[in-house]
Image (cartoon, rainbow, N blue to C red):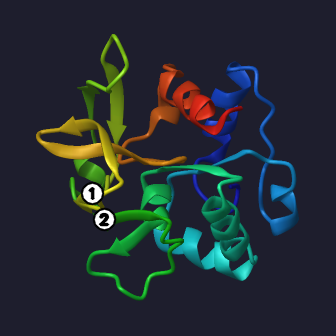
Amino acid sequence: MALQGDFREHKEALRRLGVEAKEVRKPEHLEGLKALIVPGGESTTIGKLAREYSIEEEVRRRVEEGSLALFGTCAGAIWLAREILGYPEQPRLGVLDVAVERNAFGRQVESFEEDLFIRGFSEPFHGVFIRAPLFRRLGEGVEVLAELSGFPVLVRQGKVLASSFHPELTQDLRVHRYFLELAGA
């Protein structure tokens, strides 16, 4: 989704995996897609623009019918959440059964990097955390794929994947590859 945020970095990661990525800004850009990445950026802006450009309802419909896999990173993960703690009026897609806390790991100046053990990966993944959200409540169908200090930072519900960190800011393509496999692409 190329409305706002670091979509170019995700596009480059997908290119390196041999996948041609399409920039989605309008509902018609979703035609023929099996998967959509919602990048990090500013979650309120992403939600408002998705609503303004009429993408929100079309993405929700496709995810709910199972024809579209979805991956949200950082702010994108916030937009996917069913509940955003402290911001009940913020626009959100609501397809991931989690309650998320914005900026839970601190402000921009408190950004950090940490090696993560992701279920199914044989080697640690180097996570980049920038004003990262925290998954505070997980619904029954949400599985935790990685934790940091006992808190979930990578979760999955069906074909919806969400991370508190930015895999697109590393050279490691394993999280993107995992998402493509999840999408059946």
Q: Quadrant of the N terminus?
A: bottom right
The three-letter code of the residue at mark 2 reads Val
Residue nearer the viewer, 83 or 50: 83
**Whether residue 151 is situated above or below residue 94 in the rendered picture:** above
**Whether residue 119 is situated above or below residue 52 in the rendered picture:** above
Q: Answer whether labels 1 and 2 touch (C-beta < 8 Å).
A: yes
Q: Which residue is the site of mark 2? A: 100
Q: Which residue is the site of mark 1? A: 135
> Does the rendering let one see residue 34?
yes
Q: Residue visible at 63% across and 28% down?
A: 13
Judged from the image, the secondary structure of the residue bearing numbered disc 2 is strand
Q: Quadrant of the C terminus?
A: top right
Where residue 73 sits in the image (x, y, percent)?
47, 48
Which residue occupies the extreme top position in the image? 122
Left of 165 or right of it: where is 95?
right
**Whether residue 8 is situated above or below residue 169 in the rendered picture:** below
Where residue 108 sits in the image (x, y, percent)?
31, 54
